[in-house]
Image (cartoon, helix red, strand yellow):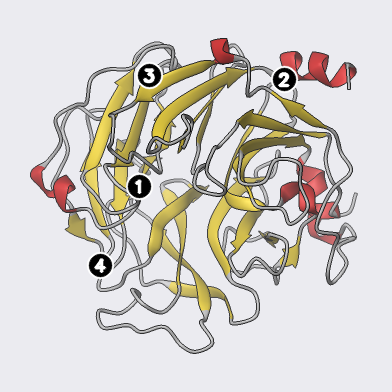
Amino acid sequence: MLPLLALPLTLAADPAPGFTLPTLDLSDQRYRQVVVDHEPKQYLGHPTTVLLEDGKTILAVYPKGHGKGAIILKRSNDGGKTWSDRLPTPKSWETSKETPTIHRMVDAKGVKRLVLFSGLHPIRSSVSEDDGKTWTELEPIGDYGGIVAMGSVVEVGQGRYIALFHDDGRYFAKDGKAEKPVRFTVYKTFSDDGGKTWGKPETVVSSTEFHWCEPGAVKSPDGKQVAVLLRENSRKHNSGVMFSDDGGKTFTEPKQVPGALTGDRHTGVYAPDGRLVLTFRDTARDTPTPGDWVAWVGKYSDLAAGTEGQYRVRLMDNTNKWDCGYPGLERLPDGTLVTTTYGHWSKGQPPYIVSVRFTLAELDELAKKK
């Protein structure tokens, strides 16, 4: 059997901007929607989530503002059906300059940590070793910065993690400035102690033509390969994907994906039957759901082969032309998928945070009717 990277990447240099696979629609099924946080006249945005090992506790973090703003923490003890009030947080969380991200990491000795990151310069982290009850203050992880810091973290060995982020020249160094034309760079850094410390960042890909950014990683079903989906910020091209067969030491050159997978801030999990579910903001150049919060259902092999997948789903209708969809995505033990993001869900109001719940069995039934 050929290794995954030996599969033909049937991606044209400039693939079609649209897609032919079916689009399902859950946006009018209000019973699936749970409001996580809504404050009138206050912008709430850009959440990430983490599911704890009990299979029912979900933590969500997000900024009080568009990226920049005090970090809010909430907890659900029932798999996202209900959510706590805003929880106490360290004073330094009020100084966050960018979208926070949260990840579970476990070191080689089995010590579990939640690690929260806050970006721009310098990237800072806050750590909890009691499942989010208490946290350290935000502290720099090094003398470097970036945008959507550590938006993707993947375990690539016992206690070893790769974290990915990007920058456009403004924040990597303290006095950074963007080039003309602007250059987007995706960086990687490794931790060998379960997220306590991080190594020197290394460039993965850098380009002025393709504005690759917001890397979203997913491991192959056998765990041997890492695929990284990439937002394309110039809006001239489709999103991209690159692969690593050696735990992130090296990556293939990014290739454009089909229009069906084109979007911002891809987040993925596997359903119980092995299918891959990705959720993101829809930025395909030819799509019936522009700027909406969507999900894609297919197989990991679709990423390698450049095929469209099975179907797409509009999760909610964003009333703004683009501003939504930095989603968390968790799979509960019963196979329910809980995805959480911000958006302009009420026309004329600032964004707020909502979860949507579904199973692939439910989506498959809808797909039969298409």
Dot 2: within a 10 Å radius of its alpha carbon, few (fewer than 14), some, or many (20 or more) residues?
Answer: some
| Mark 3 neighbour density, 10 Å: few (under 14) some (14–19) many (20 or more) | some
Front residue of 236 and 193: 236
Front position among marks 1 and 2: 2
Q: Which mark is residue 194?
A: 1
Q: Describe residue 11's horizontal placement relative to residue 249 as left or right.
A: right
User: Residue 187 or 322: which is nearer the viewer?
Assistant: 322
Residue 236 drawn above or below residue 139: below
Residue 283: x, y in percent? 65, 52
Who comes first in sequence, dot 2 or dot 4? 4
Question: What's the residue type where badge 3 is placed?
Answer: Thr
175 or 276, which lies in front? Answer: 175
The residue positioned farthest toward the front in the image shown? 348
Name the side, left or right, on which 240 lies relative to 81.
Answer: right
User: Amino acid type of disc 1?
Assistant: Gly
Which residue position is annotated with label 2?
360
Q: Position of residue 171 (x, y in %)?
A: 33, 73
203 with respect to 255 (left or right): left
At mark 1, the secondary structure is loop
Mark nearer the N terminus (1 vs 3): 3
Disc sitting over residue 57 in the figure: 3
Query: How far apart are the alpha carbons under marks 1 and 2?
Result: 33 Å
**In the structure shown, which secondary structural element does the residue marked by tag 4 occupy?**
loop
